[in-house]
Structures are given as structure tokens and as C-alpha cells.
Image: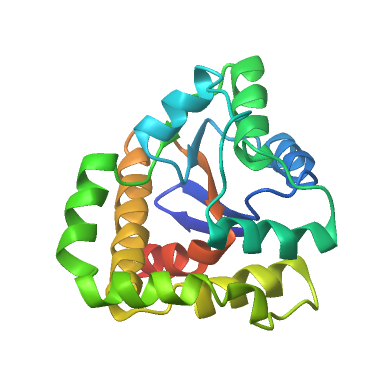
Amino acid sequence: MRVIESNGSRLAVLPVIKGLVSEGEKVAEAIASFAPTAIGVSLSKEELGGLRERQSYEDFELTIPEQAYKSGLELFGPVQLPFPCYTKAIEVADLANIPLLPVDMNEETFTEQYCLLVGGMEMVFGGMGDRRLYKKQFDLNSPEAFVRDYDRKVNNGSGYRKLMQLREEHMARTLLGMRRRYREILAIIELERADGVIKALEQ
């Protein structure tokens, strides 16, 4: 967990691995130890709303990339939908009456940027690559190494990388805006975007 202090406020960034059941307790422990006055999560407002409404995932069909991600991550422990890192954050925040806010782009903004940045050829080659995912060799030294390697190899188009950079910058701006109201903020950010968010915050 990286803590950034400025003007009497503290902003802690907790990288989390989406899907691993064990990440739920990691989040609970971080909330207990840091004692935030507000929590930001790397979700859109629509995603957070779906989790709060207990959207059903029973009939959720994974895409080929999602299946490959799940298969690799299961080597390190049980994997679950919805992601425990977020559901535990909501549960603990609600019990402790801590404000919990989405910091990622809303779906409309994300879709607009996706259409602008991810070209047709990139989408075509991405679809062709999906079918070869199970033949890819990923770094399996740790769950963190796997997630970073997966993101680097699967989402390697220039348009996609630019889109992820925009997401990171958006989350950083939102977290900085939260500091006008809250002095102790815990940001729960997916591991593959956490370094970019921290870099944007420090800049």
C-alpha cells in the first residue's frame, strides 16, 4: 500500500487482484489499519450500482480472455464473481458508515474513448488473438506477476494502452478531488492500473 501525504491529508493506494477470494480479507485489513474517512474504488458508477443492487452473476458467460484470466488466477487460490476486493469493501464501508465512491470513468465516457482510440483493425486482431490465448505462456511466479503479464500480453494494442492511461489519469483526478472533502482516503485500485494511478497522483 502506497501512502501519499499532501497538505495534511493522506491518500493510500491499495493494489488489488480482481477475482481472488483472498483479496477480500486484504481489503478488510487495510480499511481497519488505515481507518479512512472515505474509500474510492476503481469502478464506474454503473458498476458500483450493480454491486450494491446485488446483480446476479449466475448466468454470466465469460469471454475467452476472461476464461484465460480465471484459469491462470485459479493456480493461486479460489476465484469468484463478483470480485471479492470490491464486495468486501462495500460490506465493510457500509458497516462502518464510511463513504465509498466510484473513481473510474462512467460507462458513457469509457465507450466514447474506446470508440475514438481502439481502431477497427486493433479490434479485429484482438479477436483473432483471443483464440490463441490458451497457448500463451504467462508469468506464474506469483498472482501479481501473472496479472501484470496478462495485462501486458493480452491488452497490448496502442489504442488500448492509451485508453488505460486515460482511465488511470481519470481515477487520479477523481481521488485528488476527493481530498477537498476527506482527509484520509483509501483508494482500492486494480493491480494492473495501480502503478499508473500512483504515477499520475505524484505528477
The residue sitting at 53% across, 30% down in the picture is 37
Q: Quadrant of residue 3?
A: bottom right
Residue 161 lies, with reference to residue 74, above or below; the image says: below
Left or right: where 32 falls relative to 68: right
- Of residues 61 and 170, the one drawn nearer to the viewer in this rendering: 61
User: Can I make out residue 3 in this image?
Assistant: no
The residue sitting at 83% across, 63% down in the picture is 75
The residue sitting at 84% across, 54% down in the picture is 77
The residue sitting at 42% across, 75% down in the picture is 128
The chosen color scheme is rainbow
Quadrant of the rendering where the C terminus is positioned: bottom left
Q: Position of residue 103 (x, y in %)?
A: 38, 43
Q: Quadrant of residue 68?
A: bottom right
- Of residues 195 and 185, the one drawn nearer to the viewer in this rendering: 195
Q: Position of residue 200 (x, y in %)?
A: 36, 66
- Of residues 119 and 161, the one drawn nearer to the viewer in this rendering: 119
* Number of numbered discs: 0
Q: Position of residue 53 (x, y in %)?
A: 50, 17
Residue 4 lies, with reference to residue 8, above or below; the image says: below
Quadrant of the rendering where the N terminus is positioned: bottom right
User: Can I make out residue 25 in this image?
Assistant: yes
- Of residues 147 and 181, the one drawn nearer to the viewer in this rendering: 147
